[in-house]
Amino acid sequence: MIEVRNLYKTYNAKGKPVEALKGVSLSIKEGQILGLLGPNGAGKSTLVKILSTIIKQDSGEFEIDGIAYQNNSEAYRRKIAVVLQNSSLELWLSVLENLRIYGKFFGLKGQALEAAIKKVTEMFGLTPFLHKQARELSGGYRKRLQIAKTFMVETKVLILDEPTEGMDPLVKNDLMKYLRQEAQSGRTILITTQRIEEAEALCDEIVIINNGKIEAQGSLMELRRQTALNKRLLLHFNALDKHKLKAIEDYCGEKGLRVSFSGSTLVHTNDAGIDALLEGYRQIADRFEVESMEILNPSLEDMFIKVVGGGGK
Amino acid sequence: MKGIGASIYREYINRRTSPRVLVENILNPLFTLFIFGVALGNAIGTIKTSSMAIPYITFFLVGAINISLITNAVVAATKTFLDKYVGLYEEMMTYPVNRTSILLGKLIFSVIISLIQALAMMIFVFILFPGKLAMSINVLFFLLWVTIGAMAWFLIITYIALRLKTQDGFNTVYYLIMTPLLYTSSIYYPVDNMPTIIKYISVINPLTWLTDIGRYYLLNLETTYLSYKIIGLLIFTVISFLLAAREMNRYN
């Protein structure tokens, strides 16, 4: 559906060249939600702006459904709807007028336009504000309106640059639900975010980008493999006074077990895999009173920190 | 076509709901016409040429319409900066329409506003200064003249607005270019009695071209190099269109 091949982009910042993208390639399948994750200045927005046809790459190619922007710009843009980081609203116009203008640029008119407006205003809880000016809305509602616009139209691809910024958790959950529905109906979604839990909950595939380069890419499971992070064993103790804590530390030290403490929870990691973890658990549990145990997969946050923090491939 | 219609609709909705529209588009031009026409008219009296003498208010009417065309273009340019500031300009670049069609929609709307303004100014002079605009006016020519003038100023000023990143930059460039152009043109007074250097500058000044063409056809006021001024104005308009369209389609 979306193919990006070897994109390079260099900006000129105060006379100095800044390489924003250094050969980015990725592929997104139809109906897939791809999360672009990275710290500030990683190159996420540059990539989004190139795919949204706002800025031009220095080299490399990209296409949607086999249509390259260079070959047919309007046909390419008919495939996308974009939510940018800025509010992108007519602040002095009402919610209704904002939606009407957007719909008209996408060729909606008459009953089809009004039906689309009704659908999204109900979906995003904007009906009571239909005649309010956009500048009178709170930040969260402005964001809803901005996203609602893209749900009016039936483009194949939805590109969202940090769409949940400023949204309250309930609305965020609703948005994630709607995005999943859109993906199930075949819409392909590219979303950038700095919120790891969002990417973890929403995306089929995740790309971690840093310093203009893709550092890791794949499903959560594939990322775990790529980042080679280990599972962790968590042992929860009822009470852990300093004598007991010292005794556990000494014992683990003698046995060569790598542990750390978070409150009354012991965290045990082991490079040798799950069997060695369980063996470690058995040794500690036999000797001390353990209330419960958890084995945790490495979280996306762990992987992100490993990749972006310099421990990536 | 979809882009042109949507763009005109957007401009219309924006102007319709703005309380500034009445002041900017109707009252301000009429006020300028009235103050200059009356105050300077009393001071100057009549404008005498080799073949005729006409009241200053009549002479200034064409210049005042020209000023209102420029004001319209500046208002449109200011809106471009607001669009850039809130991110709407970038969003519009992603819409599935030809980007030139967005420019054309804005242009058509600006021309319509300019035509309404110019008609209001004509009616204003007819009513408030009866008998001072006593020549027969070719309405079709008048509409054509306003249309071409509105296009020329809209396109060149929009080009500058698209090219620059901030409104501060735009204001600086605008005043650097437009102030000398205004005062070395024939908008406020005939250039015949000006110092030679200003006369030379006024010959290559598009503001003079448009004003002189208007006065020739509307007031029968003689002018030199008329055909060159017409050709110059048309070339200026076409070049301005090409520049503005290129800027609208630029992405880098």
Image (cartoon, coloured by chain):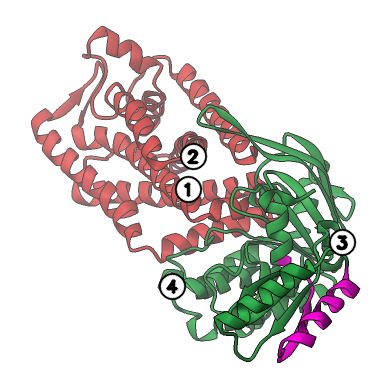
> Which residue is located at x 9 percent, y 35 percent?
B42
Question: Which chain is home to disc 2?
Answer: B
Asked if the residues shown at circle 2 and circle 1 are in contact, with their CB atoms under 8 angstroms apart, the answer is yes
Q: Nearer the viewer, residue A130 or A216?
A: A216
- As shown in the figure, which amino acid type bears the numbered disc 2? Thr
Judging by colour alone, the chain drawn in green in this rendered image is A
Distance Cα–Cα, label 3 vs label 4: 50 Å
Judging by colour alone, the chain drawn in red in this rendered image is B
Front position among marks 2 and 1: 1
* Residue A286 visible, this angle: yes
Question: Which chain is home to disc 3?
Answer: A
> Which residue is located at x 59 percent, y 84 percent?
A170
First along the sequence among labels 3 and 4: 4
- Per the image, the residue denoted by label 2 is B158
Asked if the residues shown at circle 4 and circle 1 are in contact, with their CB atoms under 8 angstroms apart, the answer is no
Q: Nearer the viewer, residue B133 or B165?
A: B165
> Which residue is located at x 87 percent, y 61 percent?
A225
Secondary structure under the numbered disc 4 in the rendered image: loop
The part of the chain drawn in magenta is A273-300
From the top left corner, tell me how far across and down residue B19 is, in percent: 33, 63
Secondary structure under the numbered disc 3 in the rendered image: helix
* Residue A111 visible, this angle: no
**Label at residue A133:** 4
Q: Nearer the viewer, residue B93 or A289?
A: A289
> Which residue is located at x 63 percent, y 66 percent?
A195
- Per the image, the residue denoted by label 3 is A225
- As shown in the figure, which amino acid type bears the numbered disc 3? Arg
Quarter of the view holding residue B35: top left
Asked if the residues shown at circle 2 and circle 3 are in contact, with their CB atoms under 8 angstroms apart, the answer is no
